[in-house]
Amino acid sequence: MATLRLENLTKHFGGLVAVNNVTFEVAEQEILGIIGPNGAGKTTLTSLVAGTLQVSGGRIVFEGKDVTKSPAHLRVRMGISRTFQTVRPLKDFTALENIMVGALFARGESLGKAKERAYQVCQLLEFDRAERYPDRLTVFELKKLEIARAIVSDPKILFLDEIMAGLNFEEMKQMINIVRSLRDRGVTICVIEHVMSVINELTDRVIVLDRGEIIAQGPYQEVSQNRRVIAAYLGEEG
Ligand SMILES: Nc1ncnc2c1ncn2[C@@H]1O[C@H](COP(=O)(O)OP(=O)(O)OP(=O)(O)O)[C@@H](O)[C@H]1O
Ligand SMILES: [Mg+2]
């Protein structure tokens, strides 16, 4: 059974169709890449799965259960988690407290247990700036914090929305290792990414979106040769 199945998923924003009749599955412990030019619908799709946006049509099936109408906080408890493309930590809380908030809300844990879990997650990510406030963190540390917040709920599936943006080569290498270690711990992963070398190195398979529709899917090596895919990227502005 697939961990996640999207059936004819559709999202309209007024007259704009941001996600158009998208159907695919994600297998357990797969690392699936979701790529496509700016505005293709990648973040919208993530928000639909997370439940922070409601679908206009179609179904979301997670571990065999239809979660299309489930509220976002219940989806987190069931094991669906995501990072945000624009990191947005709570500024008046330390990094550790930010991570604890995730544990407190997602898992309904006691303060002590939440703190313990937050520390565990920091260790796992080799994040040693837990006592700092977000404005004292580098881009790389902020991205790690964003991942920490997302995994403290102990997800079964994790959507990573452009975690490589703004990182240097060395940091990207470390981030790739982090993603692999999460997969090795049993997490199914969807990576949304513009850095194609990372997609090539990290993913088992990719889905290519353009204007809300799937235009190609398969191993990155194959898909990157696809004429529709090349045309979609060449047509990209800016
Ligand atoms: N809340 C919203 N209200 C109206 N339109 C939206 C909203 N969110 C996204 N859109 C539009 O939906 C389309 C898909 O946007 P989305 O952010 O999902 O693309 P993306 O693939 O994540 O792009 P990027 O690579 O730039 O992050 C775009 O045309 C965008 O302007
Ligand atoms: Mg996006």
Image (tube, rainbow, N blue to C red):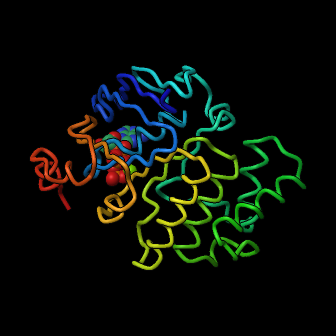
The picture places residue 78, in percent across and down from the top left corner, at: 66, 33
In the rendered view, tell whether residue 32 sits above or below residue 96: above
> 196 or 16: nearer the eye?
196
Q: Residue at x 47, y 65 (%)?
A: 176
The picture places residue 73, in percent across and down from the top left corner, at: 67, 35
Q: Residue at x 79, y 56 (%)?
A: 117
The picture places residue 84, in percent across and down from the top left corner, at: 51, 53
Which of the 4 quarters of the picture holds residue 88?
bottom right
In the rendered view, tell whether residue 26 sits above or below residue 195: above
Q: Residue at x 36, y 63 (%)?
A: 198
Quadrant occupied by the C terminus: bottom left
97 lies left or right of 149 = right
Q: Residue at x 75, y 65 (%)?
A: 96
How many circles with numbers are drawn on the protein? 0
In the rendered view, tell whether residue 177 sits above or below residue 100: below
168 lies left or right of 35 = right
The picture places residue 39, in percent across and down from the top left corner, at: 29, 47
